[in-house]
Amino acid sequence: MRAILYILRKEFLQILRTREMMAILFVAPLIQTVILGFAITNEVKHIKLMIVDQDNSRISREIARAFTHTDRFDVIGHSHSMAGVEEAIHGWKAQMALIIPVNFQRDLQRQLHPRVQLIADGLDGNTAGVAMGYARGIISGISRDYLLSPQRRALVKNIRLVEMEPRLWYNPDINNAQYMVPGIVVVLLTIIPMMLTSMSLVREKEIGTLEQLMVTPLKKYQLMLGKIIPFLFLAFLEMAFVLKAAQFIFDIHMKGSYALLGSLAFIYIFTTLGLGIFVSTITGTQQQAMFVSWFFMVFMILMSGLFIPIDNMPALLQKLTYLNPMRYFMSIIRDVFQKATTFHYLLIDVIPMTIFGLLIFTFSVLKFHKRIG
Amino acid sequence: MKLRSNRVFSIARKEFFHIIHDPRTLMILFLLPVIQLLMFGYALNLEIQNVEMAVVDYDHSPTSQDLIEQFQGSKFFHVFPYQGEMSDVESLFLSRQARVIMVVPPDFSRRLQHNPATSVQFIIDGADPNAAINIQNYCEQTILLFNETRNTRLREPFSVEPTIWFNPDLKSTYFFVPGILALILVMISALLTSITITREKEMGTLEQILVSPVRPAEIILGKVLPYIFLAFMDASLILLIGILLFHVPFQGSAILLALLTTLYIITALSLGLMISTITHTQQVATMVAQLVTLLPTVMLSGFIFPIASMPKFLQLISYIIPAKYYLIIVRGIMLKGNTLMQLLPEVGFLAAMSTILLLIAWRRFSTNLEA
């Protein structure tokens, strides 16, 4: 026991001694959280729009005006010809163009169902699709108003409509941060134990101090505990820090139980610590350790549902995600944070996560023992 | 300070063999971007299908049945009846059995006969806000269809003719191929080089070299050259896959793209050099490099998320992210056939940024060595 305390003291001193490391360990997650929390949004705003009003009538001006009243579109200018549109879109000045053809109002009054043209720069497929949706929404709103305007009421007297009354539970203001921040905590609980444990173990090999440690009376498991406990501790500290700071910065609130989340996080960290130890056994330098950890990280993140919802993936990839330990904790933390989900609902995630954690951890520790033995 | 090219090249050769002798590094350098590309190409599909929808029908009329069938007929929904108590409806969300619940009120069909508008409640699991918005849109579309079939006079007085340029099918690969290009170049040029140089510091070999006749500039150049070469190889590989497998068009000049890619690599290298002058251990260099290169390149460059939708302070930060300019360059040349004249502001920015970063890195590096 004393031996473990000594090595723990050495490890903590080593981490604390590097002042820049301490700064990084607390500043970096905060920056990551702020950037990810604010930047990740599928909402599209300030689409650069060019307007070509060839009709210049009351209704065409009304349509054009509707686009200036929303922060989804920024009207960057008017043109009279298609050449102007072409130039603006090719030169990155406009992303979208609204073209109202000549005689639009006349055709409308004659009930010829005229069409306004919307051109979108499709390079960013997602933005273009969303922007097109907004624009159609605005235009069909005006169209509907026109249809139901008092002078035309008589025509539509017998209309009977079903109306949708949407209720958004858990996140009525559509605050993306509430969804992303818990996800970022998972990334932190993965990076710190995995990358730093592996680099710290390999560092001893690289600079030759592992042999020195081996000739001391220290047992192997003591060495191992000394290496992993500090990062376990740091990971927990960071989780608490980021969760608290984010609730303050983004004005979001943890709905569930901290005790439940903490204990499940503890199970998850076994997986990432295990991976860190595993990486250290297959690499010889810190650069390699960093790289291999990075490789695991990218996969785990892509297949966890953090950015790409698992439900949207092709069936085969969806099945592959069941092999990803991060997937389970991602669902757990998002549900506990947002829905206050209780333990028995989470069992479908907790059971596979625990199995993975135990398997990976045991395997890695055995491999490490064999390696240095 | 005079540079000897033969010294530079012998260092470069040593470093190059050092890199390629390690299969792990090679695997990461070449396999990772390819897999990322495939994943983004095939996995990233923001359109959800088979949304689980629970239905609570208090009306039990032919009309309510019609409405339910309208949802069953849509490929977006998988509809199932909910038999339990209304007070316990949340368990559907907690156990992830449903993402939306439709509640048809008891007097639905009677009200629909007499009132111009009758509302039906849709409770949506908002835990994933993007999915929730999509689900809401699909519900709205389905209701619109239901209304249109029952009200033939509802035809809109005017409508929209949508046209999409450059990418009519709205494929996301057109956007991701340039994005992954920018990412991998930054990863090799900034992340790897900063760690390589920090490694020499940590191991104490930098001092050893100092007493040898080789000049610091020669060491740096020699260390950096192989990475430039690797970066180019990687870039070509990504482009080839993009063009051959995902059919991303290439409209503009390949020479212009190669030249401007070199400029971007120089910018990223200067950033890497800068990082290596301010850190002392590889662990710290790794963390700093990730923070100032990878994260902003993925998040703030317009790679996935449009810059214009971000809050103002993040938009301001995005102005100093090299990838932001490089993405416009690659997308412009490949997809729009832009010429150098159309890209002058971006090119100017990258050039200015490289000069400033190099100057700072150089001054810091020299003082570091002398101290």
Image (spheres, rainbow, N blue to C red):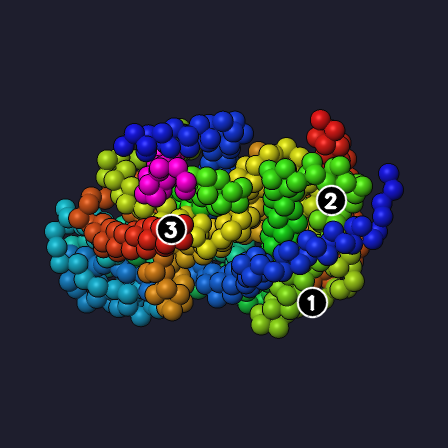
Do discs 1 and 3 belong to a common subunit? no
Give the structural element (helix, strand or loop) at label 1: loop
Residue under label 1: B250
Q: Residues within 10 Å of mark 2 (few under 14, many from 20)?
A: some
Pointer 2 chain: B
Residue A316 lies, with reference to residue A164, above or below; the image says below
Residue under label 2: B220
In depth, the one of B322 and A8 nearer the eye is: A8
What residue sits 70% from the left and 55% below the top?
B14
Name the amino acid type tagged 3: Gly
Q: Position of residue B10 (x, y in %)?
A: 77, 54
State the separation of the CA atoms marked 1 and 2. 35 Å
What residue sits 64% from the left and 66% below the top?
B237
Name the amino acid type tagged 2: Ile
The answer to whether residue A223 is magenta is yes
Image: magenta residue range: A214-235
- Tell me if A220 is positioned left or right of A115 in this view: left
Q: Quadrant of the N terminus of chain A?
A: top left
Do discs 2 and 3 belong to a common subunit? no
State the separation of the CA atoms marked 1 and 3. 56 Å
What residue sits 47% from the left and 51% below the top?
A293
In depth, the one of B114 and B283 nearer the eye is: B283
Residue B4 lies, with reference to residue B363, above or below; the image says below
Residue under label 3: A373
Count the numbered circles shown.
3
What residue sits 42% from the left and 32% below the top?
A11
Pointer 1 chain: B
Name the amino acid type tagged 1: Phe
Q: Main secondary structure of the magenta part?
A: helix
Q: Position of residue A100 (x, y in %)?
A: 63, 57
- Tell me if B187 is positioned left or right of B68 in this view: right
